[in-house]
Structure formats: structure tokens, C-alpha cells
Image (cartoon, rainbow, N blue to C red):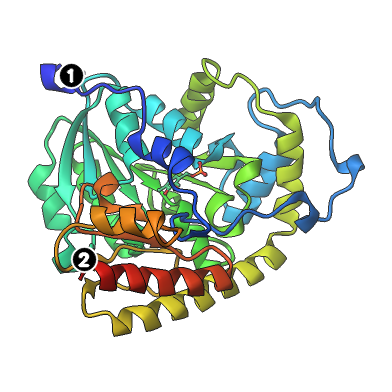
Amino acid sequence: MKAASLLHSTKQSEYMHWAKTRSGARFNLATSGLANLSLKDLRVSLDDLDITGTSGYGYEPLVRALADRHRVDPACVVTAAGTTFANHLAMAGLINPGDEVLFERPAYEPLLALAHYLRADVKRFDRRFEDGFRLSLSEIEKQISSRTRLIVITNFHNPSGVLTDDDILAEVGEIARNVGARVLVDEVYVQMLFEEPPRTAFHLGNQFVATSSLTKAFGLSGLRCGWIFAEPELAERMWRVNDLFAATPVHAGERLSVVALQQLEGIAKSAQQRFDDNRGLLNEFLDQREDLETVRPTAGSIMFPRVKQGDSERLCELLRGKYETSVVPGKFFEMPAHFRIGLGGDTETMAEGLVRLGAALDEIG
Ligand SMILES: Cc1ncc(COP(=O)(O)O)c(C=O)c1O
């Protein structure tokens, strides 16, 4: 094992800490998912709930609902507290300390921190702004080696919001298969395509492991309804890792997740409308700003503009301090000239937040 990888071991996420303590603002454009729903938004009766159930290795109605919705074998489903914990169980099941892991750059920092926490030997491949942040097979091929055990990708890419199509992912799968590696795809944002059935990279071959949740697309973060799709032997291994951490899930949460899955179609309709309306507003705003350059995805909830004059830190501070508006500073994604803006808040907040962002940009310009 390389000494450098040990030095990088970490037990915290800088971004998550910032998100919990510093991202709040009257006009919050920092969150990446649909604004949270409340219990009132679900049709639920007390008879739907209980606090004790039979969920040793998965609550059968929840596992079945997720398996049916995504057309996968229930033996391939592991449930977990959000994509966050799904990623933890998946990665811990897939790698050992010192294993080489290839990671996209820019990356979602908590996922990268997790790889360091698990003492992986992390190598990076670039997704370049100049290439529209697309996943480049040649960049992966440049970095992969016979020691690579895992390639980690987010889809849509966080922070850029760029979607990677299945044909490209399949080619990544081939590159991984050639060296005996797996591909972990955090596809929490893919739910925002609102397809039925939703696509999952897991269908592209057994070298793929996919993680997701109901958090981002449906405003259901509070349910912590996350999952992993992995071939049965791996799924079993991940359930066994869970025995060291969560042991058993909160049963009332599992029950509510089953209820939510039954009502997802209605929630999806208004969510999609929200993202489309807000994307329209953001595109109009970006059309007018010569001081920003942006790769503009046509679906999803995030974009990652670049401030032409160079550093977003001052902008983000001014915006939050004087204009009561928050976006995510690009430094959390290793690209300080950028900032990430989210489309999931209510449309009035989005509109006013953009006016304030314009004023702050004018002030630093
Ligand atoms: C790529 C990615 N994965 C996972 C998460 C967290 O998801 P969850 O709330 O389901 O744990 C986020 C949140 O921003 C994310 O961007």
C-alpha cells in the first residue's frame, strides 16, 4: 500500500459540513434537489405505519417495489439510508485498503472523501469544461492500470449536471472489465429524466454497481430511501457490511418509502415541471450574462457556471452576505472559478435569487 494513500485517509466531508452549516440563505440556490416535501404531501394513514417489522436483510415490500420499478431481480437490491449510505456500503463492499480507484475530476466531494476514508489509492481522470464536462474514454484509458479495482462516476455528473448516455457507460464497463475492475455509478440524478421504468447502469452488465435514492428528484430526502443494485453475491457482501453500521433500518421509514413509491407518478409530474420552469429562468439569465460561461444540460437540477474573471469565492461571499442568496462555491469541486447553482427551489425564490446573483456579479465585475 502506498504511504500517500494512508496520509489521505479522512473522516469527514468538507462539503457536507458546509452544506449543513453555511449554505442556508433566504434565497437558497445551493441545494441540488427538489425542495423537501412534507408528510402532508403524501396520502398516508396511521395504518400504513408501524415501528417493528421483519427487515433483517431488506423489508420485502420495499425491496420488491424498488426491484419492480427498475426491472431488477430482488436479490440484487440492497436498501440503505440515502444514496450517501448506499455509496458507503457499495464502496466498502467493493474495495480493500490500498486498492486503486479511478475517480472523475471534478467530483462530488463526499464520495471522494469516502474513498479516502476507505484508504483507497485514488487516481483521477478529468472531465473538462472545454469538452462540455463529458466523460472521456481516453482520459479513463490513460489512467487505468492492472491495479485498478473500481471506477467511480456520477450520473448526471455532479457538479456539471451533464448526463452520460448508456452507450458511453457501456464502453467504460468494457474498459473496466478488461482489467477486472467494477464501475460504481452514483445515478441519483438520473431519476430526473423521469423515465418509466427509470434507467439504471446496472442493466449494462454485472461489472456495474448502481446507487440512488428518492432524495433529489422527488423532494423525499427525509425518508432516506436509498438503494444499491449489484449482482447477488456482491449485494450479499454489502448487506453484511451494513451489519457493522446500521444493523437494521428504521422500519417506519421503510413503510413510508413503500407508500411514497406508490405515489411517485404524481410527485414526478410537479417535480419535472418545477425543474423545467426553473431551467428556463436560468437559461434566460445566462443568455444575458457575458461574465459567465456555462455548459447547459437540458435536464436535471444543477449547472456549474464559470466566472470569466476567475474566482467565485468573492462572489459567493458577497452574494450570501449582502444579497441573502446562496450558491455552492466551486472550491468544493476543485474548480474555484465555478459555482454550482440548483434548480429545485420554488420558482419565485429562483427568480429573485437570479436577480440578486446578477446584482452581485455586476458589483464584482
Ligand atoms: C452525486 C450525489 N450523490 C449522493 C448525494 C446524496 O444523496 P442522498 O440524499 O440520497 O444521500 C448527493 C447530494 O447532493 C449527490 O450530489
- Other residues around mark 1 within 10 Å, as few (<14) / some (14–19) / many (≥20): few
Question: Would you identify the image quadrant in which residue 249 lies?
Answer: top right
- Figure quadrant of residue 168: bottom left
> Where does the image place residue 72, in percent across and percent down from the top left?
56, 48
In the image, residue 88 sits, relative to residue 119, either above or below, namely: below
Say what amino acid the circle numbered 2 marks: Val
At 59% from the left edge and 46% from the top edge, which residue is drawn?
A: 221
Mark 2, residue position = 307
The residue sitting at 47% across, 54% down in the picture is 31
The span from disc 2 to disc 1 (Cα, nearest Å) is: 33 Å
Residue behind mark 1: 7
Q: Residues within 10 Å of mark 2 (few under 14, many from 20)?
A: many
Res 79 visible: no
Viewer-closest of 93 and 254: 254
Q: Looking at the picture, does residue 359 appear above or below residue 252?
A: below
**Number of callouts:** 2
| Disc 2 element | strand
Label 1 SS: helix
Q: Position of residue 305 (x, y in %)?
A: 28, 66
**Residue type marked 1:** Leu
Discs 2/1, front: 2
| Left or right, residue 61 beside residue 344 | right
2 or 1: tag closer to the N-terminus: 1
Q: Residue furthest left?
A: 142
Spot occupied by residue 83 in the image (x, y as percentages of width and height): 49, 41
Asked if ligand 1 lies within 8 A of label 1, the reply is no
Q: Residue at x 12, y 53 (%)?
A: 139
